Image (cartoon, helix red, strand yellow):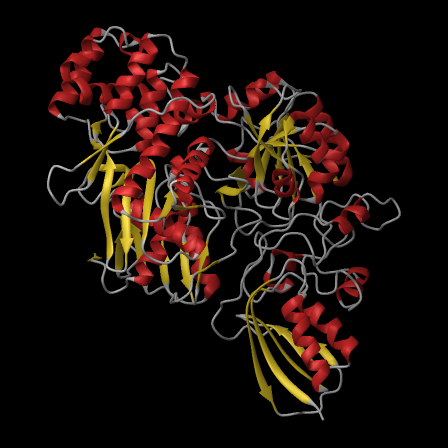
Amino acid sequence: MSRRVRVDVRGAVQGVGFRPFVYRQAQKLGVSGWVENTAFGVRLEAEGIPDAIATLLRMIREIPPPNASIVSIDVEELNWRGDDGFVIRPSAADGARSAQILPDLATCEDCLRELFDPNDRRYLYPFINCTHCGPRYSIVEDVPYDRARTSMRHFPMCPACRAEYEDPLNRRFHAEPNACPGCGPRIALWNGKGATLAQDHDALLAVADAIRVGQIVAVKGVGGFHLLVDARDEAAVIRLRARKQRPDKPLAVMFPTLKDIARECDVWPVEGSLLSSTARPIVLVRRKEGSIAPAVAPGNPWLGAFLPYAPLHHILMHELGFPVIATSGNLSDEPIATDETEALVRLAGIADRFLVHNRPIIRAIDDSVVRVVCGRELVLRRARGFAPAPIAVDGMRSGTLALGGHMKATIALTLENAVLMSQHIGDLETVAARATHGRTVADMVRMRGQAPRLGVRDLHPDYATSVMAAGMGLPLAGVQHHLAHVVACMAEHGIALPALGVAWDGTGYGIDGTIWGGEFLLITDGGWRRVAHLRTFRLPGGEQAVREPRRSAVGLLYEAFGDDAFAMDEVPLLAAFSHAERAVLQTMLAQGVNAPVTSSMGRLFDGFAALCDLRQHASYEGQAAAEFEWAATEAQTPYEFALCPGARKDAPFVLDWKPALDTLLGDRRCGVAAGAVSAAFHDGLAAAIVSVARRIGERRVVLTGGCFQNVRLTEAAVAALRAAGHEPIWHRRVPPNDGGIALGQAVWAACTEGQLPRMS
């Protein structure tokens, strides 16, 4: 008696050796039939004795290939046909394109052994890979995932590689990027005019020599160019900063091995696991005194460290034996460069040399950034190694396209029971960045093979994404910025309603036309409402206050003390303004001219940091708030944030920062250090979250928004909520910053479709 079944497997099952895995198991079990990639995943038909079929199904469910992630398995009984043997069929491209594309995977241990084995034919070959590792998302042009639909189609396999590719017992059986020095991509070293200086391994050796003498080298990697320089060379790092126009923002460092990171930083086991994972993200680890140049991360106790993830990196780091800066190949605020001829133009004046290769990069992908909070990972930038893995969300309908926000932009597209999130795109401040965002939208829609039904944008009318949405020709819905933050965190964790969302960040357009940012939102089956918010104040100079934290401080002082604030000579930052500047600021605030009202927690952090004389001017977003966090010392008596009734009976509660400000001013007059002030501030905010949760009466509390990138704040809030009997929820694989906005927009719009106001 025989049994025949058709099995449809959905999930991340292409590019992980799934078909070879099924083929080998079928051969061992004496099962006949076939397996193929499809537009939705993998389909197979298997025929054999019932016990063998049951064993095959169990192995698919319980022990799939290491990098596979199965979402669903559907089994259909068929009539017996009497197939002869088991084969891998050519891919079927028909049907709705729901197949998941795997993120790029770090070089596996087997490939590393071959890479450094002088007797292996791929010895020191910088594009070695197999079914367990190598490029995926960065090279795929379409689904199903086959070599003919990747940028490797430009490199026909030699007989030796073809034999591996067709051998069921070989690790490279149907490894789509398979290549060797004889048939695969090659590297070359160029000067600034594109002239070839060296090729192949000689090019890598020349790059190592250039880095040793302090030169800056642009290196084409998996998802784009890095700018490399010796991380121990202070002068070289300062030169890179000047050329890249990045005066203070920390630079990431690539180390040869995990032991090398441990010599320079304190690495906890969970951090070590993240650093060594197949995603190979940049991980923020605490610095020790060591050889890393101070200019790498000025005044910062944390270092963004990561390990080589591509064979080219492994060879170069093995040759150098010391850490290098490996920062995105771009000017500040521009997208990462991916094409070598483009890089010559865009990185002219920055890089001294260019290490290039001839494998096209289909889409730009930055390095992911992760830190550990409350003992587990918190993704701050979701890109290489994580994107485009979807977020499972039960009940989703396909076809909703969310364009994200203006900063740290991503996009999201709903599928059946999931949301597909793009890689990090970046801030949309430049024409080049907005063009990259538009290409990413078109790419995601094309790869899914279906036009979206609904477009979703932020409520801010002037965001680049709002302008783009207006020209898409789709029905549109707007989702409030902080609501999107809360929903993103809930969707990531599959949290059911109701929940109290604490959404704290720098800027978000409120439904009342003011700048929100210190919000408490109650979300229920009936919708959402703002139940509390930070006491508002004005920002003199508007956007200029983001770059000058001292302006936020002036806004706080004016809200608290009126015109008397400008007579407070004991406040040092006021003395830094000239009499003419003070007069202008006072007029702005008194008349509300170019001084928008805000409830922003981010700007509150800025203001308190400025009042502690930690940072008056910022060269990158969140710099003052970050330095305020780093300054925090041991726990102090928490500052008070009073919870006051709103102006009307049905108005939100107001979280008043005035008592905390009064205490800060008194403490500073008495010589209390900034670190003690910071500790009291953070712990006071954690207590304030508990106070609001108790008043609202909601047990489940969602912590989201850019302020919860702050380890001190998040861990204090989680501890305080747990101690008070609440259930805190915070991000893990979706960024708490605006990188998660698109997910929240997509989920809220898709779940409430037909109820949201439409906009033309």
Q: Quadrant of the C terminus?
A: bottom left
26 or 631: nearer the viewer: 631
Residue 97 visible in the current orientation: yes
The image quarter in which residue 510 lies = top left
- For the point 62% across and 84% down, the residue is 5
- For the point 49% across and 75% down, the residue is 95
Measuring from the top left, give residue 733's x and y in whole percent.
50, 48
In this rendering, would 570 be left or right of 99?
Answer: left
354 or 517: nearer the viewer: 517
Above or below, 645 against 359 in this view is above
Residue that extends furthest to the right in the rendered view of this protein: 119
Above or below, 159 against 266 in this view is below
In this rendering, would 512 be left or right of 326?
Answer: left
Measuring from the top left, give residue 685's x and y in whole percent.
34, 31
Q: Quadrant of the N terminus?
A: bottom right
The image quarter in which residue 303 lies = top right
- For the point 23% across and 45% down, the residue is 530
Residue 470 visible in the current orientation: no
Measuring from the top left, give residue 570's x and y in whole percent.
27, 6
Measuring from the top left, give residue 740's x and y in whole percent.
41, 47
- For the point 41% across and 67% down, the residue is 450
